[in-house]
Image (cartoon, grey):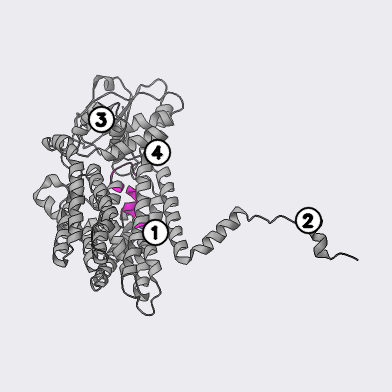
């Protein structure tokens, strides 16, 4: 009797089977992105574009003079030299320590010095997306017929901040402003979370994360830039008023604990380094307190370097800045109409609108407090979230697309014009002039920058000349530090040609007068804002 197939299969070896085909990496990624949903894919696209454009800008542009100031502190020979230089400056230490750590880990290339600001900027873009999403989830239902659901608010917030050319520019500089902005955004978000949790829970345990985040961000902000005092002073006043009016006693107690922890953490530097700095007369980096400068600060917040657009583009970009403010004010109005959002959104309005106005007013009467447009970069995060709230609805969404498009165009113009201060190009040009000078002529090189006297002259030459020269670069003339002139004028008398890399030097300075007197002819080649290569000949 013939056995069945099933019986045979029980005792015969299995037939060879074809192993399953593994999906390729491309197929896996495609499947992953399809599973994310349209909103999350849109947010990832925004983040990807932010990374790509910032990397392109950071790699293409030269270090600017302020970045050489950071470089001077960050690469100090030892701790004593670091403190000695910092005591004569008007900035706290944290950003320089972070940049120094990046230089130790990755080297002293431009991208390495800028890597902390790059990471801080990207973290803030991701944070405002989370912030906008959390607010919209708490709000009432979308208006009927809205083209944008709640899921798209994070995209609006992240895209607007990513397209802010002030955030874009300072997010690729070896400076402290991107770090300060991230800290203020974390603190405002944390303070808002305390108010929200006080609605939902009783007791302080659910607020522990927000409390710790606020304390850390406030202490870090003070050690990044002293303008944090204005932000946290005004924010604390607003929080106390809102908490007292709305009866948020648990939130007020947790905020008080966080503020006290931040104060204690800031005390060591406040009574040592900050105290030393207050005793000298070095003015703040920004001291523009004209009424016009307040308006410029709100324009620059999302539309920085509008001159890149020419006369017509400049007007369009100013109009785009006005639309951002109007849409953000609409978002504020919609949030104030919601009982769930009324208290927390007042803190956002404080960071976005109140701090720039009040800090400008304070600088009118206390000049040492300082004010300029890049000091208010931390307002951009809260403004972007309010913008996302105001972009809800078909008509509002269509209007909001206009400033977002204009800001994106201005980002593209920055990528096309990276040399705001092209020290790299200036040094390369000077090296070429030395190389092509007649061999029988004596050529001297000077690198001089109009800046606080504590910083050494010639840093741009010392940084770029060894990197750009084929072989050993020519030595520059030794300078009288703090005097903006050379140590030996007699050496200029022996020269047939003097090449000067000059940053914003007033014409009445001793060195410029000496050169004009001894060399009747000179040419000037510009390399960005206030930066020129002057070639003096007989």
Q: Secondary structure at mark 4?
A: helix
Image vertical order of residue 219 relative to residue 78, above or below? below
Where is mark 1, residue-wise?
409
Where is mark 2, residue-wise?
14
Of the numbered discs 1 and 2, the one sitting upstream in the chain is 2
Q: Residue furthest bottom?
A: 144
The mark lying in front, picked from 2 and 4, is 2
Where is mark 4, residue-wise?
112
The front one of 488 and 238 is 238
Q: Residue at x 19, y 37 (%)?
A: 269
- Is residue 388 visible to the viewer in this orientation of the structure? yes
Horizontal side of 361 relative to 105 (left or right) equals left
Q: Residue at x 58, y 57 (%)?
A: 28
Q: Residue at x 40, y 45 (%)?
A: 58
Q: Secondary structure at mark 3?
A: helix
Of the numbered discs 2 and 4, the one sitting upstream in the chain is 2
Horizontal side of 164 relative to 230 (left or right) equals right
Measured Cα–Cα span from mark 2 to mark 4: 59 Å
The front one of 308 and 262 is 262
Q: Which residues are magenta?
A: 161-178
Q: Position of residue 144 (x, y in %)?
A: 37, 80
Image quarter in which the C terminus is found? top left
The 10 Å Cα crowd at callout 3, few under 14, some 14 to 19, many 20 or more, is some
Where is mark 3, residue-wise?
82
Of the numbered discs 2 and 3, the one sitting upstream in the chain is 2
């Amino acid at each position: 009797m013939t056995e069945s197939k099933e019986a045979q299969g029980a005792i015969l070896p299995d037939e060879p089977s074809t192993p399953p085909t593994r999906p390729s990496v491309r197929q896996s990624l495609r499947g992953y992105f399809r599973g994310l949903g349209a909103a999350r894919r849109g947010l990832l696209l925004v983040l990807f574009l932010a990374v790509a454009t910032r990397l392109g800008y950071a790699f293409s542009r030269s270090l600017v003079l302020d970045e050489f100031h950071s470089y001077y502190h960050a690469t100090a020979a030892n701790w004593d030299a670091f403190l000695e230089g910092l005591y004569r400056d008007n900035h706290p230490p944290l950003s320089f320590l972070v940049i120094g750590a990046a230089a130790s880990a990755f080297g002293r290339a431009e991208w390495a010095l800028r890597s902390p600001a790059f990471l801080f900027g990207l973290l803030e873009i991701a944070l405002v997306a989370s912030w906008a999403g959390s607010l919209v989830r708490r709000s009432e239902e979308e208006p009927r017929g809205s083209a944008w659901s709640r899921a798209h608010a994070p995209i609006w917030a992240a895209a607007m901040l990513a397209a802010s050319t002030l955030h874009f520019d300072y997010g690729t500089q070896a400076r402290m402003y991107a770090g300060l902005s991230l800290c203020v955004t974390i603190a405002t978000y944390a303070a808002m979370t305390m108010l929200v949790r006080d609605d939902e829970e009783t007791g302080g345990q659910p607020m522990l994360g927000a409390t710790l985040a606020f304390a850390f961000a406030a202490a870090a902000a003070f050690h990044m830039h002293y303008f944090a005092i204005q932000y946290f002073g005004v924010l604390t006043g607003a929080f106390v008023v809102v908490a007292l009016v709305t009866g948020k006693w648990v939130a007020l107690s947790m905020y008080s604990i966080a503020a006290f922890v931040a104060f204690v953490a800031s005390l060591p530097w406040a009574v040592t380094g900050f105290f030393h700095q207050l005793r000298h007369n070095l003015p703040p980096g920004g001291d523009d307190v004209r009424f016009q400068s307040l308006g410029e600060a709100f324009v620059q917040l999302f539309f920085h370097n509008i001159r890149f657009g020419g006369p017509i583009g400049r007007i369009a970009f100013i109009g785009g800045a006005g639309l951002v403010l109007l849409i953000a004010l609409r978002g504020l109005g919609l949030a104030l109409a919601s009982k769930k959002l009324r208290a927390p959104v007042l803190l956002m309005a404080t960071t976005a609108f109140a701090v720039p106005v009040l800090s400008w007013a304070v600088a009118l009467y206390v000049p040492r407090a300082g004010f300029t447009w890049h000091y208010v970069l931390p307002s951009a995060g809260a403004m972007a979230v309010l913008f996302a709230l105001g972009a809800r609805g078909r008509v509002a969404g269509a209007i909001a697309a206009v400033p977002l498009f204009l800001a994106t165009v201005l980002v593209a113009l920055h990528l096309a014009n990276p040399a705001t201060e092209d020290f790299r190009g200036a040094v390369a040009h000077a090296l070429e002039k030395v190389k092509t000078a007649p061999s029988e002529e004596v050529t001297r090189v000077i690198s001089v920058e109009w800046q606080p006297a504590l910083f050494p002259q010639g840093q741009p030459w010392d940084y770029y000349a060894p990197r750009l020269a084929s072989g050993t670069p020519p030595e520059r003339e030794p300078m009288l530090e703090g005097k903006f002139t050379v140590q030996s004028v007699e050496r200029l008398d022996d020269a047939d040609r003097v090449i000067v890399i000059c940053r914003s030097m007033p014409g009445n300075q001793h060195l410029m007068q000496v050169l004009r007197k001894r060399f009747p002819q000179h040419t000037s080649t510009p390399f960005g804002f206030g930066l020129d290569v002057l070639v003096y000949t007989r």
